[in-house]
Image (cartoon, rainbow, N blue to C red):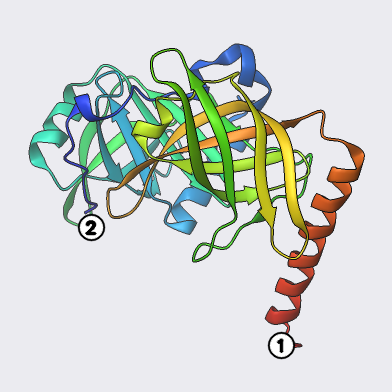
Amino acid sequence: MTEIDKSGPAEHQPNRFELEQTDDYSQYLLYSQAEILAVLRSLIQKGALITVHFDQGKSFFLTSMISLKPDNTEFVIDVGSNEEMNAKALKAGKLIFTTVVDKVKIQFSLDRLGTTESQGRPAFVGSVPDKLLRLQRREFFRLSTPIANPVRLCTTVRHPEHGSLAVDLPLVDISGGGVGLIVTPDQAKLLKKGDMLDNCKIVLPGEGLLVATLCVRNMFDVTTRSGSRYVRVGCEFVDLPAARGTVLQRYITRVERERKARLSGLT
């Protein structure tokens, strides 16, 4: 069984699901049953941690996909660790499943869950969805930044209620097109899709200071295996000058080359 975050609904913002923003993300929706089944099988093979949201995003539990039924019309998932939350999930009128596999975001929804058993243990069963969001952008190579000593972004956020606030945020990845940030739910309240972040300062180790303007393009909740909640913020560079883009690409190329060299045992 998987663990559950017991934080109350008042402690975080309502979740933002790209699956429900069809105007912006329709190109990432899959409708082919063969493609949808292939994605579900990958969740099973990789043991992906899945967050199931319901009650308008106020409640959730963590699970993983166990199997597909032989006729490929239903799938089986593990129950959560909290019986009360499991009971609420069974009564829910809409459930949204979210996960990330190999940096690709997966989302789909169901109208209901049922009960079943898997290897003699209680489990949930659901119908294979007729559409699934597979959000993967390949325009730029995306370099994951170090976890222990992350690259950081410093900027000023302007908020109608809180005024101008200086923030210092860790990057989870960077590419020629933008950056991925990880923020707390409270920090996420200062941002919204479409916000412009001016005069962002990013120190690229070995290359120097990169100053750029960023636009917030997407935000989504991330739940760790320990149950901690964060918000990942995807930002796009706006009119990045060619010279600065060259510095950025040089940094990405060098770090990736050094990583490959370490893996091959050359350094």
Q: Measuring 49% from the left and 66% from the top, which residue is drawn there?
A: 148
Q: Looking at the image, is 25 positioned above or below residue 81?
A: above
Q: What label does residue 119 carry, if any?
A: 2
Identify whether 190 is placed above or below 42: above
Residue 106, position as x, y percentages in the image: 52, 37
For label 1, the SS is: loop
**Foreground residue, 134 or 130?**
134
Q: Amino acid at mark 2?
A: Gln
Of discs 2 and 1, which sits in the foreground? 1
x then y, percent, for residue 46: 48, 57
Q: Position of residue 235 (x, y in %)?
A: 63, 33
Label 2: few (<14), some (14–19) or many (≥20) C-alpha neighbours in 10 Å: few
Find disc 1 in the rendering and name its residue: 265
Q: Is residue 81 above or below residue 134?
A: below
Pinpoint residue 204: horizontal percent, then vertical percent: 70, 56
Picture residue at 30% right of the left edge, 46% below the top: 63
Q: Is residue 1 above or below residue 132?
A: below
Q: Quadrant of residue 146?
A: bottom right
